[in-house]
Amino acid sequence: MFSSLAYPELVKQLKLHKINAPPNVDGVIDPVWAQADSATDFVQYRPYFDKEPNRRTVARLLTTDQSLYCMIVCYDQRKNIQQNTGLHDDFGGDVVSLMLDTFGDKQTAYKFAVTASGIRGDSRLLDDARNRDYSWDGVWFANTRVYDWGYVVEMEIPYRSIQYDERRQTWGLDFDRWIPALTEDIYWNRYEENEGQRISKFGNLLFDDFHPTVKGSNLEFYPVGLTKATYVRPGAYNVDPTAGIDIFYNPSPQLTFQLTGNPDFAQIEADPFAFNISRYETFFEERRPFFTQGREIFMASGRQQNTGFYRPLELFYSRRIGKVLPDGREVPLHIGSKASGRIDDWEYGGFVATTGETEYVEDDERKKELQAGFTSLRVKKQIFGNSSVGLLFVGKHDRENNDGVIDVDGAFRTSHWQLAYQLARSFKNSSGGYAMSVGFTSFADNWMTLVRTRYIGEEFDLDQIGFVPWKGTAEITGVAGPRWYFEDGYISQILLYGGGALNYEKVDHYTDHEIALGFNMQFRDSWGYEINVNFGKTKDEGIEYKSLSISLSSWFSTSPNWNGNLWGGYSRTYNFSREYVAFYSWGGIDFNWLATSILQVGTSLNTFIEGNPSGSTEDVTLNARPYFSLTPLNDLNLRVYVDNVFLRSSERNEQVLFGLLFSYQFMPKSWIYFALNELHNRGDEFDSNDVPLPHRLHVADRVAVAKVKYLYYF
């Protein structure tokens, strides 16, 4: 039923021809490319949906026994082609992409992107392209050359660098070209404007007397050497030279192992400042490569990149592993290993990690984080063509406690709607509780419908392994409304919606209820805005009051050289940090400017205004994070940022975080890093005689790391 609805249109096809001698991957059109079939009938997706592109594009594919080769010829005048330096997975300018569904499951695909200046980017498309995994990095090669009439991109993708079903006669296929001078996005395949790209609507790559069957050790071996200097007191540092190892092993095209030993993540940029007046902890995204790579297999179904309306419960929150303790110390991660693969319609994954025992201080009391082992197991099956059902287990064990959760989740999908569900049972030693969530999203041609519901039992405790802090709560939210798409003109879309929400919190013995209204407008020159109004009745900490929230968000990318976001809002709510009902207002901007082809500067600026019950302003917090990023050569970058926190009540900076990162990718997946992070705050400070000093801005922490990571590829 579901698969028949997903892809009824005629499928495009491109035949793959085998050659004996490979082309040179140099951006020069070799005669051998005349043997390849070509894809030329591209179609606009943005800004004028379903129109003929303004620039001609030709894509071709060839193969040898070892590798797949792609050439994309992009016609344009040289003056219009934007060639900016950049880093792997971090770039701008003109770019083309090749996408491959190597299992024919119409749910997942590889994406290989190359800019006009030769920068590479790769990712995995998930859940029928509703999600992206940008942490995936493959070993592949590309080169470009710019001419007066356009530019040429050539790629080589070794078969041993990707997973695939070697029995298939076809792979799913698409090409993409982004033309920033025209803000034009074109694809080889046609997608519905209201849906976006869908793997289920890919064309077919047909194998002509050839099937990839590359065998070998497929072993990636990364020795890591690093030296870390940690600030102790003025003039004193702990210097710790050490080493680590990362190993990737693909024993077959359907199976991957990953192992890390003694990893260090000091080159990761520090989390941004978070301002929180709610009763729940702040969620921080995972940034550490070992945990981000391949994490999609351990995620519950239902996330969608183009909307944050529904998000399944975060049952595996990897930030709990190797976490930062209350006194700033980090729990060491000694070793970690992951395995993932697939058999026919089944996907599976496993994860294990061990952390060391660590002593720390909290509220002047010495405590101990015990040595622990973490485990996760995942099985997922594709059903009804483009839907899925799965089982997930996550656990933590130490000598005193056993924590864990078992989950059943899945999603029913067509190309324009999705119904995701999740049911989980937690356990902590002999106790435990239940939780569930359901989300429905539908974007039809002229109507949008969004519904979500969530229940978290009072005994559902995942504080050691997941991020589900809303114990003893239940919620249901629904909004719907008309959508207008305009084929021509300055305005591209208008969306008007309304609905309501009920939110029960057992701690308050009350069900909050509110009405929600929204208006969204988008324009063809890549900017838009949205206004939201929510009002109702709420109870917090025994106080019933009328709640109100008005917010504005805007995004703009009207020039290839700059982009940004602007937001702000006003609310009447309970301030849990100050324990009263009052107004709370916020505003901010995030701005990025490409000053030259090698230099990008920008900043984020946030303002948080807390009111008091009398209606006057209690305090104002300002947070600015200016940065510059210098990339004189592709894959060589120096990034510097300063994160400042200023309080109006003290009329001074309370915290300054300085960060510097030099990175150079000198070979595929081989890096040199130098990182420096320095924190200044007004915490307790003592002189050499342990006499307290005034609360001045002083160095609280400083860490410098030099790191080399080198790929041996067998």
Image (spheres, rainbow, N blue to C red):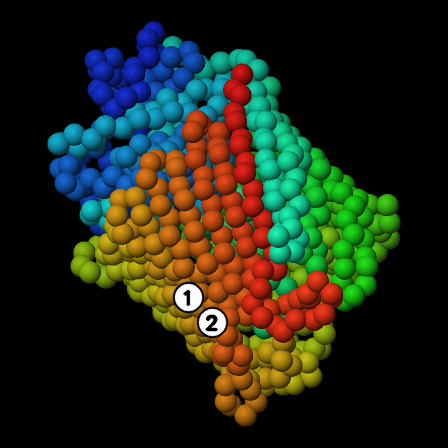
**Residue for point 50% across, 38% down:** 673
Q: Which residue, as the protein is rendered here, is positioned at the far bottom?
A: 614
Q: Is residue 37 visible?
A: yes
Q: Is residue 424 left or right of residue 9?
A: right
Could you say which quadrant of the image residue 158 lies in?
A: top left
Quarter of the image where the C terminus is located: top right
- Would you name the residue on which mark 2 appears? 622
Q: Residue at x 76, y 67 (%)?
A: 363
Give whichever of 49, 658 is nearer the camera.
658
- Circle nearer the N terminus (1, 2): 1
Whether residue 368 sits left or right of residue 16 in the image: it is right
Answer above or below: position of 478 versus 186. Answer: below
Disc 1, disc 2: CB below 8 Å? Answer: yes
Decide: few, some or many residues near mark 1? Use Cα within 10 Å; few <14, some 14-19, many ≥20.
some
Q: Amino acid at mark 1?
A: Leu
Q: Secondary structure at mark 1?
A: strand
- The three-letter amino acid code for the residue at tag 2 is Leu
Q: Is residue 210 above or below residue 9?
A: above
Q: Which mark is residue 605?
A: 1
| Residue 438 image point, x, y percent | 59, 56
Q: Residue at x 38, y 65 (%)?
A: 589
Residue 81: where, in percent of width, then height?
20, 39
